[in-house]
Amino acid sequence: MVLQAIKYTRGHLEILDQLRLPHEEVYNQIEHSKDAWHAIKSMQVRGAPAIAIVAALSVAVEAVRCVQSLDHGTSQDDPSKTASPAETAKQIGLQLEYLVTSRPTAVNLADAAAKLKLVVNIAADAPGSDCRSVLEAYIASAERMLINDVKDNEAIGRHGASWIQNHARKSPDAKVSVITHCNTGSLATAGYGTALGVIRTLHAFNTLHQVFYTETRPYNQGSRLTGYELIHDDIPCTLITDSMAAALIRMKTQSENIAAVVVGADRVAANGDTANKVGTYSLAVLARYHGIKFLVAAPRTTVDMETKTGADIHIEERPQVEVLNIKGPRVSKDAASGQQKIIQESAEEVCIAAQGTRAWNPAFDVTPAELIDAIVTESGVVEKDTNGVFQWGKVFEAGAVNVPEVEAPKTMGMRSDGVTALEPSADLEINGVGDLSPQAKGLRESKELEIP
């Protein structure tokens, strides 16, 4: 069973607190958009697809409460106490803009906000619309994003695994090893994963020898989260420190048949420059020097056609303390076996740098397009033409706009893997990033979606 980082049923949202992994599995309830903002900012939930979904669903939870208040309150008897459709859409839009400020580098979040704002604006303008119809349109569309993400990740896995089999293997029957960075699996998405989805599919195809995964300092998303997922799924894997990657490629490529580096992305510019967890750029340089393939795996929502190059991508800088300190449980050593044993409920934060140390802590770096061999999306693999330019035509239809139906889904249940299941509906296909308004900035202390 694939790990579940997001638990959602209509009106109820919980997230797996990734700051407490891999030693504790604790789910935190998200009741308001403010809860989601702090969970995203503190990295209790992380990964570009996952934070977009958590943000969207947090507003959906509030919207469900608003619908319930319409059902049980006095507003049904007194229409003057109910917000107009336009007022409802505006308030939802402000909540979404507020949430975008939590992690500005990840384009999925802004993209989801822009799409959902368009959905509620269309619903508000529909003949006969009212407050309820706008709220229900939002809820249905936010839930659909959750379902579509899992489907898209599985498609990314198939496309990426096939590309590696066809372009990176030395012989048709050879098993390959890959290197990955940060965490791009079920914990970073609604399920299955992007780069880790490619790895899962290679494993399912029985063409994977093993995965080498970096610890990914300073937050250790690799050692804490990717390792947790790989071990959970019984996928052969070996942890390395970030600084070991060059030695690994030089010393082990032949014996381990290392064929590719596969990473995720937080934002892909129109020219293919890719912002991802800091350390990605150095892996791309190493891959190019040593002649192994470098792949980016990301849904189309990560591609920001409004951002022309990586130079235009805002890079978030995080607190120095994340570099200076490290947190984990104490261990003891078994005298007989020599194996270390974790002492439960003993997590401590310790300083690993000299007193007075200053640290620079960018969360991301930008890998130039010329170092990337291919970008894997749910619609296919994008490669460069003979001029070295990525051609997006096969994954983006020029001018295509596909807006989902606004009525709520008819049925809802839980799949066997714990993911909320809705009836199939139209996919969202609108690209764009919403502008942050002054009103949205003022919602930082807001706790609820307030419909007058």
Image (spheres, rainbow, N blue to C red):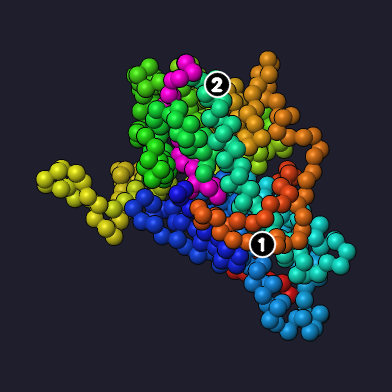
Packing grade of label 1 (10 A; few <14, some 14-19, many >=20) is: few
Viewer can see residue 358: no
In the rendered picture of this protein, how many numbered marks are placed on residues? 2
| Mark linked to residue 166 | 2
- Nearer to me, 283 or 119: 119
Query: Element type at marker 1?
Result: loop
Query: Element type at marker 2?
Result: helix
Q: Quadrant of residue 269?
A: top right
- Nearer to me, 241 or 391: 391
Q: CA distance from mark 1 to mark 2?
A: 41 Å
- Residue 209, how many percent across, how many down? 40, 27
Q: Establish if 308 lies above or below 231.
A: above
Residue located 75% across and 81% down the image: 75
Residue located 72% across and 38% down the image: 306
Packing grade of label 2 (10 A; few <14, some 14-19, many >=20) is: few
Viewer can see residue 383: yes
The reply to whether dot 1 and dot 2 touch (C-beta < 8 Å) is: no
In the picture provided, is 205 more to the left or to the right than 60? left
- Nearer to me, 217 or 389: 389
| Mark linked to residue 411 | 1
Q: Amino acid at mark 2?
A: Asn
- Residue 318, how many percent across, how many down? 49, 47
- Residue 165, how many percent across, how many down? 52, 23
- For marks 1 and 2, the one nearer the N-term is 2
Magenta segment main secondary structure: loop
Q: Which residues are magenta?
A: 171-191
| Mark linked to residue 75 | none
